[in-house]
Image: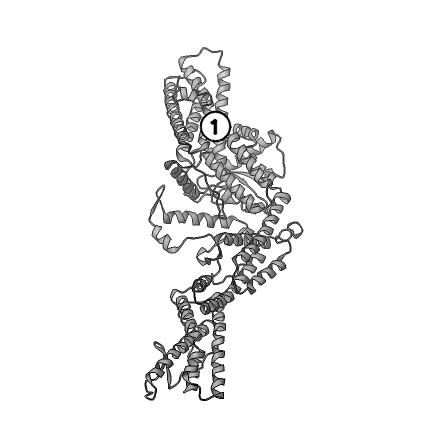
Amino acid sequence: MIHELLLALSGYPGTIFTWNKRTGLQVSQDMPFLHPSETSVLNRLCKLGSDYIRFTEFIEQHTGHVHQQEHHTNQPNQTGLHGIYLRAFCTGLDSMLQPYRQALLDLEQEFLGDPHLTISHVNYKLDQFQLLFPSVMVVVETIKSQKIHGCQILETVYKHSCGGLPPVRIALEKILAVCHGVMYKQLAAWMLHGLLLDQSEEFFVKQGPSAGGAAANQEEDEEDLGLGGLSGKQLRELQDLRLIEEENMLAPSLQQFSLRTEMLPSYIPIRVAEKILFVGESVQMFENHNHSPSRAGSILKHQEDIFAAELHKLKQQPLFSLVDFENLIDHIRSTVAEHLWTLMVEESDLLEQLKIIKDFYLLGRGELYQVFIDLAQQMLKTPPTAVTEHDVNVAFQQAAHKVLLDDDNLLPLLHLTVDYQGKESKDVTGPRDGATPPQDTSPREVPPTGWAALGLAYKVQWPLHILFTPAVLEKCVLCSCLCMAFIQLCVYFKQPCSLPPCPVFFVLFRYNVVFRYLLSVRRVQSQLQHCWALQMQRKHLKSSQTDAVKWRLRNHMAFLIDNLQYYMQVDVLESQFSQLLQQINSTRDFESIRLAHDHFLSNLLAQSFILLKPVFHCLNEILELCHNFCSLVCQSVASLDERGTSQLDFLVKGFRRQSSLLFKILSSVRNHQINSDLAQLLLRLDYNKYYTQAGGTLGSV
């Protein structure tokens, strides 16, 4: 019977020890010669045999090779469990069973040498597994019942290894070390070669945009988020549509990757995972780009073998050390970030590219746009047509020549775009490698004028396209809604309002939004200056009361617009741009550059009030009133007739109302010390307290 017991414990039941799928291994009831205490001891041993048989069935089911008895039929994989992490878990589980198998062999040798040994000896020899097997079986059943997949297996094994039983902890740590071997191989392929070897979606890095949990998404599908009536489902549709569109526009060397956070083990912090993501993205970009090797070199500075050896050394450690792991990740990340900094700042002349962005997107070349406004004023007054884009680009080239901007290498990279009804979504000039044409996924409406549809495209050269993506150079409806809601909450709760930089791959804010806004301010300022020229031409003529009202209104409008323009160009653009250059020059880390650039864009949109709806709407209304006033003055060379006087009175009342509203908003914000930017604009407008003494109203006679 002892040999029958050893065979049963090895997974080969017979007539004395029978196997039942539900109850497991048990002593047969047809043994009257056994004392109840003996039956109890044998059934206790049979529990080990039951666990062993279930272990070996699980291993064979998911690996196809194990020390298993012949009469057990192979069960088809009905659980849906699969993947390399599961196979690694089975390999570790099989190695954990090896001491048990060896103990059974030793018992057989002992019984052959001494036939007088009893069942108690078997119970004593196998007692060490009485705690181990049930605890490991809990892990196996958890994986099977919850269909644990990929790196989630690491988390499951890790949690169960944190118990207080040393045999269980040691065994599960050995299994975890085997599973970590798979993770280290994926890390080596991703971080050293830019290869995402993950056919079964098990790794915590994936290709494509990040997505929230399905359960949370389902709950938020119809929930109104308070962002202009958008529900959670509509918000995600906007986000996914934008990200898919931008990924298609990007060069193959700039595919989007993101973290699959549900696969990330809890003992690996998100900050470390983001560093892993950054390194892999950078290496993948270099591996896929057919750039000159002599110029780009190795992004890892030919240290791939050294880093591979370090990863292999970590793999050989019996216990996972977060300190050693993060130190190595930091070393690799620093190497990549420093190489990218060198490539972008020194070889690709990032500072010159930023100056180009400032000159053209942020109207740094004011004389160029002054000439362009004069040339394009008439052609952009009406709704755009199919030929408008060609005409404005001709005017732009003429303006560049007039201000002696004859850079043959720069001008071909710039292209003004005009969106009109019926225009195809792709660039009319055809796809250009690396080009960043403005795109919009919202339904197209008929622009009232060409100015409202004007945009600027810039062909960014490799590798600067990883910093100036199409997402950066264009607008994003989703992010604008989120940021606007954030600022409104800050104002409501009277808290300091400082927008954080975007940590994800696509930057939230867009240069083209600022470009259109600055151009509209500059255009109105130019029109008011033209009205002043007309006033100087007519100053020798006899003036009426209406003329006094008209020129006083122009003076007040020019005062407000000039101070707004000065605030935008000096207090916002020049200040933020100088800070950006200072931060770039003070580091040799690409991630610091990207973070500084994100801060620059965030502060740009925040301080220009584009995201603060009440102020932005008020300023737009004032710009529209100024434009209508200039049109009225230019159309009426002589004194105004009755209709013109009525229109002038309407403009005076509108300007007084909007200037009063602006003053109240700026004053209320200043009183609560919420936003220093609004206080700075108010300081420009009310530097001599004239605004305050006028009751916060401009345009009065």
In this view of the protein, which residue sits in the foreground, 104 or 368?
104
- The three-letter amino acid code for the residue at tag 1 is Leu
Look at the picture and state if 58 lies above or below 510: below
Q: Which residue is mark 1?
A: 564
Q: Position of residue 17 (x, y in %)?
A: 38, 83
In this view of the protein, which residue sits in the foreground, 684 or 461?
684
In this view of the protein, which residue sits in the foreground, 437 or 148?
148
The answer to whether residue 382 shows anywhere in this view is no
Q: Residue at x 42, y 28 (%)?
A: 624
Q: Residue at x 38, y 35 (%)?
A: 494
Relative to residue 209, is residue 328 drawn left or right?
A: right
The N terminus appears in which quarter of the rendering?
Answer: bottom left
Look at the picture and state if 38 lies above or below 411: below
Relative to residue 574, is residue 2 drawn left or right?
A: left
The answer to whether residue 161 shows anywhere in this view is yes
Q: Position of residue 653 (x, y in %)?
A: 37, 22
Q: Position of residue 396 (x, y in %)?
A: 56, 33
- The colour mode here is one colour
In this view of the protein, which residue sits in the foreground, 453 or 101?
101
